[in-house]
Image (spheres, helix red, strand yellow):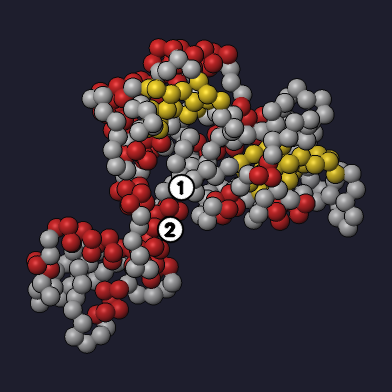
Amino acid sequence: MNTEEFTSEQKLYLQGFMSGTNLARTAQGLPDLSAALGQRSGAPALLSAADGANANGAKPAASAPAPSAAGPDAPGLAAQDRVLASGQKLTEQEAAKRAKHPLDQWDDIVQHSNEARFPKGQDVLAWKYHGLFQTAPTQNSYMSRLRFPCGIVRSDQLRCVAYVAERLSGGYAHVTTRANLQVREIKAEHGAQVLAMFHDYGILNRGAGADNIRNVTGSPTAGIDTRELIDTRELCREMNAYILNNRAMYGLPRKFNIAFDGGGRVASLEDTNDIGFAAVQVQVLEGRSVEPGIYEVAQSAPLLAAGMNGLEEGTDSMSVSSSEVLEVGGGSMPPSTSCRGR
């Protein structure tokens, strides 16, 4: 078999296939595919994923083990590699994300705005990572969704939303069930400008749609409810900051939800979320030496075990491994966080 018979596109495909296969085999302690086939008598040499060595009678260079995925995109890439190694194909959306991560497409958004163009194909999905939703065919415009953890909006931020609504969109804003605000009827040429104006006021759109964790909600009366056990505002802010600043969080199933309930008069319906935390007051816990106090406990599987069991003996905090956040969505995630009681 002569590798010169392959086109450049075919060689790139083979390199990707070999890379994914070798990554999976290395993780299982097996030799890479080229080495394994080379042990069989008469087996043709394959195109090396590392150096593209040919098979024109020359002895192929020894293949190095496929490097493990590293960096914040590693969990997603590893999951994609497992799919490819099993002989399956990625969906069009996952293939597009693998080629270029949506969060790296700001320059493309600016270029489209400068040319008064809406995105096409998989760029429609990528724009959602930045909070821009093309609403065609209902409207030939964008909708922008704004993240406000715990539903808290400053007065200057609200004035900014009003300005954008009046000057650059349809003159109104909608409130969503997850305490977001949305502005509609944004023209193609105003997409990047609208996002930049929101960013100037600390209003973030990143991860407001597509394969991301949606707005983190808390008790609607947090901070002013005399019956609340825990003020959920800070918990929501901390979780929101973690999500926004960890790219591993940008690969979960659509509409992944997290909520905190402080035990006050108005519930946050945390039990309907993928991950929910509820405030509880512990007075006596039979058989356990848990110090009496107020704690936030997990309410949703597979974090149910981190509920009462998450109340650490002799402490005033409930620690939940952050890796379990992505475990709910079928992935994995970096270091741990704690939800502390008072």
Question: What is the x, y in percent for residue 255?
Answer: 52, 43
In the displayed structure image, the side of residue 189 where residue 61 appears, left or right: left
Quarter-of-image position of residue 6: bottom left
Q: Nearer the viewer, residue 110 or 241?
A: 110
Tell me the amino acid under the disc marked 2: Ala
- Residue placed most toward the observer, 18 or 197: 197
Residue 325 numbered tag: none
Image coordinates for residue 161, horizontal then vertical, percent: 49, 17
In the current view of this chain or complex, which residue is farthest to the front? Answer: 138
Q: Is residue 50 visible?
A: no
Q: Which mark is residue 251?
A: 1
* Residue 164 at x, y percent in the picture: 43, 16
Under mark 1, the amino acid is Gly
Q: Residue at the location (26% across, 79% down)? A: 37
Residue 117 image-quadrant placement? top left
* Number of other residues with Cα within 10 Å of mark 2, as a class: few under 14, some 14 to 19, many 20 or more: some
Residue topped by disc 2: 79
Q: Earlier in the sequence, mark 2 or mark 1?
A: 2
As drawn, 130 above or below 168: below
Image quarter of residue 227? top right
Residue 156 image point, x, y percent: 54, 13
Task: Please say if the residues under marks 2 and 1 sit with CB atoms less than 8 Å apart.
Answer: yes
Alpha carbon of mark 2 to alpha carbon of mark 1: how far?
Answer: 10 Å
Residue 95 visible here: yes
Residues packed near mark 1 inside 10 Å, few (<14), some (14 to 19) or many (20 plus): many
- Compared with 296, 266 (above or below) is above
Left or right relative to 102: residue 241: right
Q: Secondary structure at mark 2?
A: helix
In this rendering, the answer to whether 38 lies above or below 153 is below
